[in-house]
Amino acid sequence: MDIRRFVHSSFGLSVLCFVRTLAFEGWSGFWRRLYSRSLIDTDASGVLSSTGDRNEDCVKASAEHGETVGVSILLIVTGKVVSSTACIEAVRSQVTQAHFDLFLVQFHNAHLRWSYLPDSTGLNEVPLPEFSIEADLLAHDAPWLSSDVVVLLEDTVVVQPDWLGALVHTFERYERAGVVGCQVLYSNGKMECAPSQDWDCSRGALSSDPRHSRNTFVTDADQICGDVFAVRRELFSGIGSLQAVLTSSLVRCRELIRLARLEGYLVIYQPEAKAVLMNQGLSGNAGLDDRDWLSRGSHSGPDTDIDSGLAEGLLDRIPGRLQVLVVDKYMVRPDRDSGSLRLENILRLLRELECDVTFAALNLEAPEPYVSRLQLLGVQVLCRPFFSSVKKYMEKSGHCFDVVILCRADVASALMSTAKRFCKNAQVVFDTVDLHYLREFRLADLRKDRLSRLLAELRRGQELSLIAQADKTFVVSPAEERLLAREAPLANVRVVSNIHNVYGRRRSFSDRRDLLFIGNFVHPPNVDAVCWFAEEVFPLVLTRRPEIKLLVIGSQAPRKILAQQSSNIEVKGFVPDVVPYFTHCRLSVAPLRYGAGVKGKVNQSLAHGLPVVATSVAAEGMFLEDGVSVLVGDDPARFADQVLRAYSDEALWTQLSDAGLAVMQEHFGFASARRVLAELV
């Protein structure tokens, strides 16, 4: 086997990864990386956890929405006191800021007496004679038509906690949402029906497991359960006759979905809005033929085995929409590293461009709360135990994708040949995240180490080979684009840089103090940067301003970072909410001596109006000008002088803050990335 084939083989990649980690980080770095991945892997089974283990932040967000949304819940009474009482109590227990009114709609044959209910406070009864309901419910002054959203709920359904908040949040998040369906379960935990499109693409059977990746993300759907769903008032009031709508879940679904399509609205499935059917599903499929559905088309049939292709993969999607598969090395964790924040925003933009997006971590991990974050964006996440291999999934389902994005060199090396062979209809994109070989060459220059240079040469050959095979290559900075113009002149290279919201400056110069460093310490350049700053730069600062403190934020800090702690250096570790630090500190420091790409720590600081003192490596490719939007220093004395200048000069500090915010607005907002992605799709 020649060296090139060895480098691109799975075994070769593993060996090189091991050697590279030992060479660049030592045994401590190897064990730290292994430990950090084991922490994630132990959480991967979270995809199988109960409803209560789902992303609490997402649930909380749903509950906090709806301040301006009014909801009318039409509870359709069948006459069974036990079920009606359970249904009413479940609705009353909802914790949400949305105002809602509950109306009991019962027909002549329901015979539910108020005296049967343990507590009828706050209930509005709508007694309806059988077959004479058109005039009553379609009146424009009907109280339920004054609400923004109308929920149709049969009393055989018990809604679960945060059900209403999730529904309301969906209408707020998606302006074109017209009808929102729920994840409805039998009492044994299986799904009543899965969301799907009614067009036939022969993609096999649906899964009745509510935890399956095809059933756990927000998506467009034609099939929803008619026993409980929400609809915009405009659509509800546009129905010509409610006689059939209120007596048949099949008809009400069909009619409201037809109206939604006619008016240009979306029909959305919201898996966080959960409900349980009482007295149903003792065998998992009981009553399937007796209940009212929208047509299941070609989707009926038993669940298929794991990795059985599209039956276990793509949810049937709207024809004409681009199917995008994105694979990264690990799960997207935007609160822990800059690359993840960038990728999450890319996925968000792809969804806004109306692409159907499927994401997979190469190891198929599924830690919470990160899976739920993506699913609420409308991204399908492939994970264990429903899938055993990304490569196997691509072999069976790859022909359905229009775009495949492989993130980072190791992922692209593992999957490029599979993507080119089995994703024949797709553009294959290599997203470098940053050019790893550039970073490794800089480390070799810093160390003056033969082994480091050899590994950098191997990485260079690997990445240039991947760039040659890919249809498009993404880099994060114009500097890397210019480098590839020389080293790979035939490559189709586009810049998709970091993507940030720009928050602005929340405190003035005089209300701030201390220095901030933020970075994930699994990334070796961050370890080197803090050690260099603490040992060679910060002592020079303290000789003139001994009151200054350095606050260090970042997960997986090794012992050499913890050893730097003193009365002036505080190592905070992982911090879930970093905003208070951006508003408290007077300066951010980015003392990176080697690296590549665009530095998220610099982006984040500038987006909050926090001026940055950086090395040339940290500031490259970011449209920053020394003395205008950043201060640059590459040796200890110069870096310390720049820190002291900005820390003591309010006029300079304000100028740097204003100019940094302007750079972020112009170059690192969503608009520029949207243009490149729109060209791709």
Image (cartoon, rainbow, N blue to C red):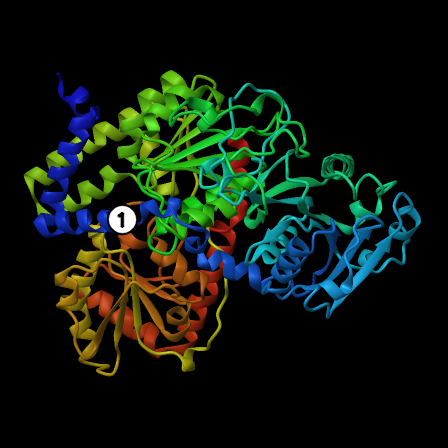
Counting labels gives 1
Q: Is residue 48 above or below residue 150?
A: above
Q: What residue appears at the point 51 percent right and 29 percent down from the top-left corner?
A: 206
In the displayed structure image, the side of residue 265 where residue 574 appears, left or right = left
Q: Quadrant of the N terminus?
A: top left
Residue denoted by label 1: 42
Q: Residue at x 16, y 52 (%)?
A: 32
232 is higher (above) or lower (below) than 264: below
**In the foreground, 13 or 319:** 319
Above or below, comparing residue 644 to residue 517 in the picture = below
Image location of residue 300, percent across then percent down: 56, 24
Q: Is residue 224 left or right of residue 545?
A: right
**Residue 62 falls left or right of residue 585:** right
Q: Residue at x 63, y 49 (%)?
A: 157
Which corner quadrant of the image does residue 472 belong to? top left
The amino acid at mark 1 is Thr
